[in-house]
Amino acid sequence: MTPDPHPWAYDLSLLYGEVWTRLTRGVHDRHAPARHPTLATVTSEGRPQARTVVMRAADKRAGTLDVYTDLGSAKVKNMRAAPFAALHVWDRSAHLQLRLEADVTILIGRDVATIWEGVPPTSRLSYGVTPAPGQPISRALDYTKVSDAESFAVLRLEISSVDALHLGPNHRRARFDRESDWIGTWLVP
Amino acid sequence: MTPDPHPWAYDLSLLYGEVWTRLTRGVHDRHAPARHPTLATVTSEGRPQARTVVMRAADKRAGTLDVYTDLGSAKVKNMRAAPFAALHVWDRSAHLQLRLEADVTILIGRDVATIWEGVPPTSRLSYGVTPAPGQPISRALDYTKVSDAESFAVLRLEISSVDALHLGPNHRRARFDRESDWIGTWLVP
């Protein structure tokens, strides 16, 4: 028998560590699966929405993740009505699906001035499009990208639970909750 | 200048056709990005959830997609409370993000008997795990997979809108609605 390439999947503590290793890799490695999670929100009508976002910060100790967005985007509108998010990552090489639940705080203006200063000028063009994102336009390129600090928002996701599913010869699934200090319990996959 | 590899992204009608080509490929090709979309739902507490699912059927004319699940899964519980879903696909080779909104019908029993007959015996083991999916267990493998037709459910997603974002030298985004007969309109990305 060849050794299992993912021995961390057999132990709750190691598994939880691996989750944050993979999430953190998304911040620093453009090619890591956690670089581009899918963020789900709920509209004011109670309907789900999902879109790709870019992982910008991961703080294991605080249990938080950061995503940047245009303040005029639909997801900000969603989160103002329902300040919750789910984050989904499929890490193919780890055979690991991550499902995170989070409470969201929308940070703007002075609270994100330092972060804004660290955003490269070309990337700043992603914040401040006119008309606002999602508005109908007559032709596909009838929009202008401008750099606008007032349109820059940081979504701080305070993770409340982590559901980790490892697909091996036998599937293993665990859930870690903030309120249980991330100790973790196995779940039926 | 090299020709754009995705000329379909410049025309609403061609773009909509490409969306369904890609979705349909997910049914037949295990390696297609649309094989494993992310499905978002809303809990009875109004919180978003997201997980990977497998694309099982795509019907462009009807505007429906099928996903199979265990009747005891949390997503079924979600959809009984809020019969809505969002489906997300990132198709890397097409530089295309698909975001679909759908109304969901949960089909079981006699309504899915013919589909169940077509599920290979080994795959049938995915429907009928004991205890139910998501239940806490003492050890990671304290569950038994059994094949149970009574636990087999088909989630029929009746698509209400398609949001397609193409990432090119200039980003293009369009929205197609069932109630507008899928004609489509450009949106600010």
Image (tube, coloured by chain):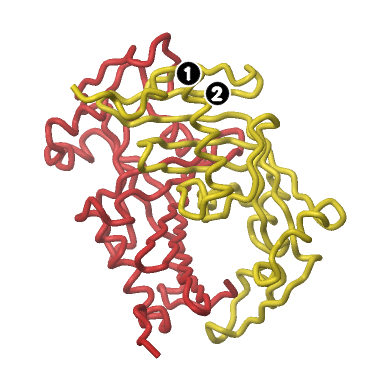
Chain colours: A red, B yellow
At x 66%, y 46%, the residue is: B66
Q: Amino acid at mark 1?
A: Leu
Give the quadrant of residue A98.
Answer: bottom left
Is tag 1's residue or tag 2's residue first in the polypeptide sequence? 1
Residue B1: percent from left, percent from top: 18, 21
Q: Where does residue B6 sit, x and y in percent of width and height?
A: 36, 28
User: CA gap, disc 1 to disc 2?
Assistant: 9 Å
Asked if residue B47 can be seen in this view, the reply is no
Q: Quadrant of the N terminus of chain A?
A: bottom left
- List the single residue furthest toward the top: A138
Tell me which corner region of the image, top left, top right, bottom left or bottom right, holds residue A19: bottom left
Asked which secondary structure carries label 2, the reply is strand
The three-letter amino acid code for the residue at tag 2 is Phe
Q: Which chain's residue wears label 2?
A: B
In the rendered view, tell whether residue A36 sits above or below residue A179: above
Q: Give the residue number, with chain letter if any, for mark 2.
A: B176
Q: Residue lying farthest right?
A: B110
Answer with left or right where residue B99 lies relative to residue B128.
left
Q: Nearer the viewer, residue A32 or B82?
A: A32
Q: Position of residue B103 (x, y in %)?
A: 68, 38
Chain of the residue under label 1:
B
